[in-house]
Image (cartoon, coloured by chain):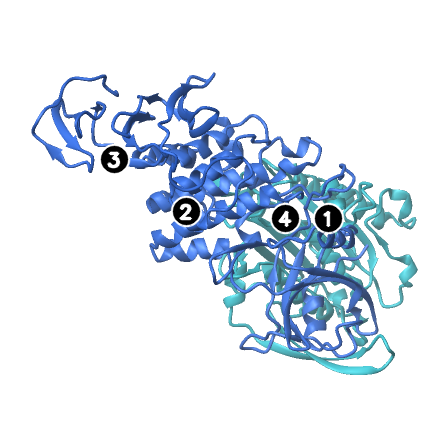
Amino acid sequence: MYSARITRDRRTAFVFLCDQSGSMTERIVFQGSEMHKSEAVATIMNMAIEELANRCRREDGIRDYFDIAVAGYSGDGIRSLLCTDGTFASITELVRCNVPVKRRHILRILPGGNQLSATVDQRQWITPAASGNTPMLAALEYAEHALRQWCSARSNRLSYPPTVINITDGEASDADDEQLLHAASRIKSLSTYDGNALLFNIHLAPYTTDRADTVSLPCSEDELPNVKYASLLYNMSSVLPTQYSRMLSAADLSPKHAVCYNCPADELFNMLAIGTASSSMTL
Amino acid sequence: MTITTVTQYIESLSSPTGLFRTLGEPVCERDSRGRPVFFAGGNAAVFPISVDGKKYALKCYTRPRPDAADTCARFASFPSPLVAPSRFLPDEIYVYDTPSEGRWCDAILTEWIDGFSLDFRIRQAMRRSDAATLSHLADAFDATALALLDELWAHGDLKPSNIIVTPSGGMMLTDTDAAYFPGYTESNVRETGTPQYNHPLRSGLPPGKYADDYPIALLSATLHALADDMTVGRMCDREMQLMQPAEILAGISEGYAASRRLAARHGDIPLLAMLDLLVSPSPQLPGLRETLEYSLRFRSCPADLPATSSGIATGRNSDRTIPETFRSDAGKWGYRCGDRIVVPPVLDGALEFTESLAAINMCGVKHFIRTDGTTAINCSGYESIKPFRSGRAEVRRNGKTLVIDRHGAEYPDKVPDGSECT
């Protein structure tokens, strides 16, 4: 289980669900700059897609190891945020997309204490958006539908199981807790011969959160703050397989839940890297 | 819990000032957009860099590797022409988690090996329909495998992407994270190789020198099958895998069955012998060395043959002793001179030598072989063949009896009856 190697004939899939509700206009600090949460998430999603493309680079170019879907959920409903047709896009399709390139200027602190101005050119597959309510149930159902088709495809039956990563800053507006738990269960029941789909939930911290309040990949619910919503996300999330823990740390193999509560924007990219750690299972 | 991403390493190498502890400001290769060139793998990214004018491969891990230092130190204790010298650099590269915070990461610096991976060279040869190159790659691999079997350590993760073909046609090994050294126990070995190239039972056994046996047999068989007949490449998946170990052992590998058929058709006895090894119930393949040596001898490049430790003579059968048939416990036929195996027992039928040629049956296909075990006359078009008498051998095709000479040319004359190879 969770041991299938990812190849071009047996890809794995990543589905990212991005909260684009009105609360995402709240301002936070990301990489030393203040911006809307939606801008930070868009930037980080673009970094994550770039990272997945980087992981596919071999001697002969970019290899198509992953099927990627990115959907936004807001008052405008659920929509794919990628520039390609269809729900899923391959890595090479994304790399070939003619998307704008944004130049970010970052002031870095060198280990010796000096400052250094750096520029990073980043492709903009995802653009920021924020409006209306938080139809998280509809988003989960979108992911379920997409992955049900993906898992049933003959070419994917032996593949490494797909991963869903839900990034949200607040509670759903279209469902109660029970409905969300059922939707999460339906996603987690989808499977390939190598195992069940994995569901990560990442809750974005508000501006004022103390980093000490961040709980990442807890082993038990007791590690979470006494907040109903935190428990909900915890119970919606998958328990990471042992192989996953081994990919993350050779020393600590205790089972972890795929949830991060009060995740600061600066930590979100790391969480997405963890959420897509299965991408190291390429042949 | 923090993962180091390829993106973070790229950013540090793009502007290395102040971010390297011992390497100063390494100069990395850049692409047309000015970005560092790199190659990613499952657990690391490798950047070609120059330090003080000398080229190196800088390996940066994206997964925890607590034994990387130990592995480097072990290879330093077992220097080998198969592996380029490496240095473990603790806390060498600074990567940023935020613009103001970061951490130092370990790296491995390896002397650069010019060339392309075996995976790349196979694909290139297939695209160009270059059978000659495939044949050279197959022979070079067999020679490299013999040298590897002579080492005290095992690579542990042999596959085409971990083998570099140098401009001179030799091969060197990279990505030694799964290496086994004498004295290792299960606690030492954290990587168990790539399942697609290993016997299904390997992960259940303690680590050992045998770790390279099955991948060697699989790669050798694949290369020789492609060299014999490139059309079998249509059965490869997109990772250029012709046969999957689990399917071979389950008896359902179409690539394996096709390879056996073409080995028989081409009279490629060492390929058949290698394919027989692949159905071993164990990852340990005791006959592997002899099969590799036979393969090199069979393909007749005496100047390139390595020194062997098994006592099997290289090159042609120089002492002119005529081999005799023998039958294995499994009911297969081979040839030997005393205790020395000339042809391993993989044949379905074998007659004694007459006039230095012997009729054999490989999976129903007939050939004549020489006393050194190499194929002299491919008789795949005949239903049956008889031993040579006075320079001629009787053969049958479509029910009609014909006669061939020692070059395989057909004649209308008949020769005295002898036993028949059917």
* Cα distance between the residues tagged 1 and 4: 9 Å
Q: If you read the primary sequence from the N terminus, does the residue marked by circle 1 or circle 4 appear first?
A: 1
Q: Is residue A38 in view from this perspective? A: yes
Q: CA gap, disc 1 to disc 3?
A: 55 Å
The image shows residue A188, relative to residue A282, as above or below, that is above
The colour with which the image depicts chain A is cyan
Q: Residue at x 41, y 37 (%)?
A: B255
Q: Are marks 3 and 4 on the same chain?
A: no
| Extreme-front residue of the structure | B319
- Tag 4 near tag 2, CB within 8 Å: no
In space, the residues marked 3 and 4 are separated at their CA atoms by: 47 Å
Q: Which chain did the image draw in blue?
A: B
Which chain's residue wears label 2?
B
Numbered circle sitting on residue B302: 2
Q: Pinpoint the chain carrying mark 4.
A: A
* Disc 1 residue type (three-letter): Met
* Image mark 1: chain: A
In contact (CB < 8 Å): disc 1 and disc 4: no
> Dot 2, crowdedness within 10 Å: few (<14), some or many (≥20)?
few
Labels 2 & 3 near each other (Cβ < 8 A): no
Q: Nearer the viewer, mark 4 or mark 2?
A: 2
Q: Secondary structure at mark 2?
A: helix
- Mark 2 vs mark 3: tell me if same chain: yes
Cα separation between marks 2 and 3: 21 Å
